[in-house]
């Protein structure tokens, strides 16, 4: 069994013994072995909504069809899909789901592959009558088994011209041909003599919207044309032919029923197809598949083109590239200055990415004047097992087009989500499950300290227990959202606010590691707090406190997740939504939120996550499971911990040495 079939069997939980791929050798062998052993077989093929990128370029698949009778593109014999369309009594629930999915496909321009341009070329924007001929790939099995080989593909072009004398005739080339992976089934040189050949990789739905009629042999785009209410002429017998909706040159005698578009869609896309979400690593349905493709396609599209990165230290450059995988292609350039970028070809078409918020004002001005897309990049809220300041690779990033979450002086993408997004019931339920998982497994931004029991020395029964999380004092969130408040000033303000409370101060782990600024002398801190806790997990402290008082620390948000009362003295991203007690206010934040909607925005909608094992994008739940394994390894395997810390230590020393050499030069 080849690797592709084995992987799909695991993902889609296929238990059949004799499994093969369509009418390819593996499929023919599965049928032969099943007959020999008086058993059953199962044939697989890609589903009708397959992936974001091309299958020939190994993009993860969202769907597969399973057939224990034949295969849908083989009109020479029955298939399970044909039997469904011929015999099934479609329930109203199935048809309603089909209508919903069709509307989403039309709205979001979803096709089999989803990496093509959503912008129509200017030469197609005219109002003239247009006819589209759809080419396929040479040797495509759907042509052989779809009864299309009895026609010369040139005949489609000749008929289209003859039957539409006052129209412009266009030929669409298959994306696998455009990518250089396969040859076209239609002679391109011949086509160029009689019609306009479209060589751009345009989204099929966007393209089809501009045409009145479509001519094809067996292409799935013919069915997508039906979804857009176009006239379709077929020179073959694809799965959607023979049901009363198409103009057919070939008749399949077995197909005797006239059915609706929604019934064909429900049969093919819902009853015949199984769906799998590769980013969430779980089985799913057509609606989730469409929404997931829309979400990740947006990320991949942002990653297309020439990308210029500023303020990315040498060690960051090593891990950043997987977060910027494109749907088509890109070029990543790291730059030290505007001058450096211009020598590398910076133009108004380029996209600009700046780590953090500080500096590079000339770059921002250049982007404003020239219309470049500019994004700020930062670590996400669930980052890694070890510290960022130890040069540990992050597994989440935020890439913000409008601002950045820790800077309240300007609206960020996160703030826009919280002010404008309509949170579905399903998303809020997912956020609630995520909250439970985080609490149960004691996750935080950094996950390197063990959970311990804390001795509250000097505690008097009945005292309110408060935690003050220390922060890095030159951190951008303090500069922009905390009015440069120091950790000592936080302790002083908390003691003034709660004079009788038992206050625990927990220094920031980066400060404890000696990597960042923000230390408070123990003697001075103990004038305002009762206890200093250093190397313990956040959960160890939060489990015993009643309140958390913070400037802008992410610990405040993590405390909300755990049901604690939170006071903010700065303006963190989670303040101002009705969930915290805030010293300062921000008038832009007008919407009151539930904890579930805040979790959904912060953990699900805003960041990008990377699977530590595959270095591909993933959903937050997948990352948490991987971090759980890594944290266990870190805490229980002394050799792994020594290796990780040694690697990070030497990486940091090399980074500092290179920085010194470069500055010296």
Image: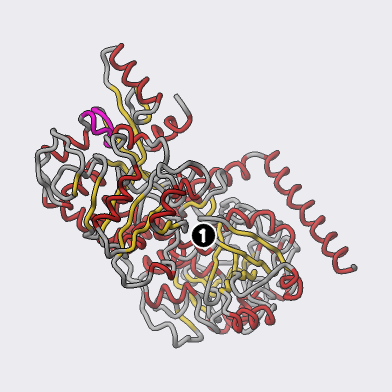
Task: Confirm whether residue 454 shows in the render.
Answer: no
Q: Quadrant of the C terminus?
A: bottom right
- Residue located at (26% from left, 46% from top): 269
Q: Within 10 angstroms of label 1, few (less than 14), some, or many (20 or more) residues?
A: many
Residue 207: give x, y in percent of width and height: 36, 61
Q: Is residue 261 left or right of residue 218?
A: left
User: Which residue lies most toward the right here?
Assistant: 664
Residue 376: give x, y in percent of width and height: 59, 71
Relative to the observer, which residue lies in front, 609 or 278?
278
Asked if 339 appears above or below 130 in the picture, the reply is: below
Q: Main secondary structure of the magenta part?
A: loop
Residue 164: image quadrant is bottom left
Residue 495: give x, y in percent of width and height: 58, 80
Relative to the observer, which residue lies in front, 583 or 227?
227
Task: Specify start and end residues of the magenta stretch as a single range.
Answer: 69-77
Asked if 282 appears above or below 312 in the picture, the reply is: above
Residue 65: image quadrant is top left
According to the picture, the residue beneath numbered tag 1 turns out to be 608
User: Which residue lies most toward the top here?
Assistant: 36
Q: Is residue 96 left or right of residue 131?
A: left
- Residue located at (33% from left, 53% from top): 133
Magenta highlight on residue 75: yes
Q: Is residue 172 left or right of residue 568?
A: left
- Residue located at (34% from left, 31% from top): 22
Magenta highlight on residue 281: no
Asked if 595 appears above or below 646 in the picture, the reply is: below
Residue 391: give x, y in percent of width and height: 70, 56
Task: Confirm whether residue 266 shows in the render.
Answer: yes
Relative to the observer, which residue lies in front, 568 or 425?
425
Tag 1, which secondary structure?
strand
Relative to the observer, which residue lies in front, 460 or 485?
485
Asked if 631 appears above or below 291 in the picture, the reply is: above
């Amino acid at each position: 069994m080849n690797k592709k079939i084995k992987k799909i069997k695991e993902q889609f939980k296929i238990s059949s013994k004799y499994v093969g791929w369509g009418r390819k050798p593996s499929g023919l062998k599965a049928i032969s072995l099943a007959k020999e052993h008086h058993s059953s077989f199962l044939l697989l093929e890609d589903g009708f909504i397959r992936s974001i990128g091309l299958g020939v370029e190994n993009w993860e698949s969202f769907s597969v069809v399973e057939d224990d009778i034949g295969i849908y593109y083989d009109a020479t014999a029955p298939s399970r899909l044909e039997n469904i369309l011929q015999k099934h009594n479609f329930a109203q629930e199935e048809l309603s789901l089909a209508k919903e999915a069709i509307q989403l496909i039309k709205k979001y321009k979803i096709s089999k592959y989803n990496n093509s341009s959503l912008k129509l070329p200017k030469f197609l924007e005219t109002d003239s009558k247009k006819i589209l001929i759809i080419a396929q790939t040479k040797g495509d099995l759907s042509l052989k088994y779809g009864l299309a080989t009895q026609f010369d593909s040139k005949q489609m072009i000749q008929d289209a011209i003859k039957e539409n004398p006052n129209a412009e005739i266009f030929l669409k080339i298959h994306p696998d041909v455009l990518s250089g992976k396969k040859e076209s089934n239609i002679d391109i040189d011949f086509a160029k003599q009689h019609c306009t050949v479209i060589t751009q990789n345009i989204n099929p739905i966007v393209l089809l919207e501009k045409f009145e009629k479509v001519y094809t042999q067996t292409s799935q785009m013919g069915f997508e044309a039906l979804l857009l209410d176009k006239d379709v002429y077929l020179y073959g017998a694809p799965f959607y032919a023979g049901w009363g909706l198409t103009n057919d040159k070939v008749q399949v005698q077995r197909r005797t029923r006239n059915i609706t578009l929604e019934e064909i869609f429900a049969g093919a896309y819902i009853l015949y197809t199984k769906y799998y979400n590769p980013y969430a690593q779980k089985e799913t349905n057509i609606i989730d598949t469409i929404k997931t493709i829309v979400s990740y396609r947006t990320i991949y599209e942002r990653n297309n083109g020439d990308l210029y990165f500023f303020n990315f230290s040498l060690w960051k450059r090593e891990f950043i590239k997987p977060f910027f995988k494109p749907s088509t292609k890109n070029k990543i350039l790291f730059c030290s200055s505007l001058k450096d970028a211009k020598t590398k070809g910076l133009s108004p078409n380029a996209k600009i990415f700046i780590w953090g918020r500080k500096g590079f004002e000339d770059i921002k001005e250049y982007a404003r004047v020239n219309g470049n897309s500019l994004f700020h990049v930062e670590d996400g809220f669930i980052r890694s097992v070890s510290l960022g300041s130890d040069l540990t690779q992050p597994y989440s990033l935020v890439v913000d087009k409008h601002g950045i979450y820790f800077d309240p002086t300007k609206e960020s993408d996160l703030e826009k989500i919280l002010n404008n997004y309509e949170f579905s019931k399903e998303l809020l339920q997912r956020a609630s499950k995520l909250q439970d998982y985080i609490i149960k497994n004691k996750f935080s931004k950094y996950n390197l300290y063990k959970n311990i029991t804390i001795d509250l020395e000097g505690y008097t029964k009945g005292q309110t227990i408060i935690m003050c999380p220390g922060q890095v004092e030159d951190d951008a969130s303090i500069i922009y959202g905390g009015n440069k408040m120091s950790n000592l000033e936080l302790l002083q303000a908390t003691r003034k606010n709660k004079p009788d409370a038992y206050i625990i101060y927990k220094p920031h782990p980066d400060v404890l590691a000696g990597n960042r600024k923000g230390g408070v002398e123990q003697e001075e801190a103990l004038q305002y707090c009762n206890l200093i806790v250093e190397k313990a997990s956040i959960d160890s402290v939060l489990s015993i406190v009643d309140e958390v008082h913070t400037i802008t620390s992410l610990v405040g948000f993590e405390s909300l997740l755990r049901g604690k009362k939170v006071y903010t003295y700065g303006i963190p991203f989670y303040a101002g939504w009705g969930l915290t007690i805030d010293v300062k206010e921000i008038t832009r934040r007008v919407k009151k939120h539930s904890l579930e909607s805040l979790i959904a925005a912060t953990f699900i909608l805003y960041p990008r996550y990377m699977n530590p094992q595959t270095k591909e994008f993933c959903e937050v739940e997948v990352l948490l499971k991987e971090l759980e394994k890594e944290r266990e390894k870190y805490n229980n395997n002394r050799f792994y911990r020594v290796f990780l810390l040694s690697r990070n230590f030497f990486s940091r020393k090399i980074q500092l040495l290179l920085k010194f050499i470069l500055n010296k030069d």
